[in-house]
Image: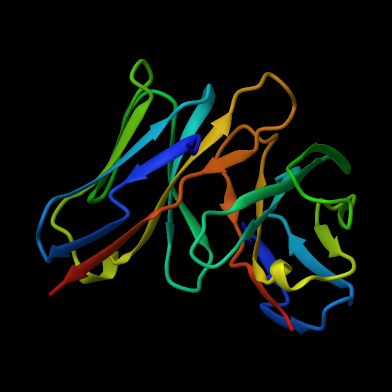
Amino acid sequence: ETGVTQSPTHLIKTRGQQVTLRCSSQSGHNTVSWYQQALGQGPQFIFQYYREEENGRGNFPPRFSGLQFPNYSSELNVNALELDDSALYLCASSSDGIYGYTFGSGTRLTVV
Amino acid sequence: KNEVEQSPQNLTAQEGEFITINCSYSVGISALHWLQQHPGGGIVSLFMLSSGKKKHGRLIATINIQEKHSSLHITASHPRDSAVYICAATDDYGGATNKLIFGTGTLLAVQP
């Protein structure tokens, strides 16, 4: 087992730019979820992918989009960045979304 | 009112003390998770439970499905236990998505 790896660990972007965050799922896991954690808050669900299809979405605008690849790695894309997008973005993988989750260490995004 | 509530929000203990963190939820769930997050860091899954009790080392997690309540206990607390402990529920909407609904966390500081 290699765990969940996220990249980059830290990122600074300018308002209006676009960003791509990456997540490598734990071996054997086919489900990946993305969460946004603002400073001092609990994580909020962005969306979930299962076998390359989005199968659930939280209350986030369409400029938040994602992909899951055949090897179950995943990307989170955010267009037209806003200052409020500054947060820790967490990726979590699981097997069929039923059993325990394995979290990555997160990507700290700062929008200036 | 949040769907997952934790108490207390902040907790300071002396090394060796027995610690209890509580979690109440108002939604139907398929599982309840206890997670640990060190400052600025990613999330580690401690327990996932849907009934009864689980124990791992000095950590014990219990859940009462009828009362929609779970507790995390730490016996013989140690300064290295200092972290944010987060309760999260896997929703049970009957669909394909098993997103996590997070509490706001309990910041624990164990003093030597």
**Vertically, is B64 above or below A1?**
above
Q: Quadrant of residue A66?
A: bottom right
Query: On the picture, is B55 further left or further right than A11?
Result: left
- The residue shown at (65%, 38%) is B99
Quadrant showing the N terminus of chain A = bottom right
Q: Toward which corner of the image does residue A43 lie, by quadrant?
A: bottom right
**Looking at this view, is A98 or B23 the one in front?**
B23
Q: Quadrant of residue B100?
A: top right
Residue name at image x 73 percent, y 73 percent: A83
Residue B12, image x, y percentages: 19, 63
* Residue located at (29% from left, 67% from top): B82
x, y percentage for residue A68? 86, 51
In screen coordinates, is B36 left or right of A76? left
Tell me residue B65's x, y (percent). Answer: 38, 20
Picture residue at 12% right of the left edge, 75% below the top: B112
Q: Is residue A62 left or right of residue B109?
A: right
Please state the horizontal and vertical placement of residue A31, each as a whole percent of the image.
Answer: 74, 42
Q: Quadrant of the C terminus of chain A?
A: bottom right
Q: How is the image coloured?
A: rainbow
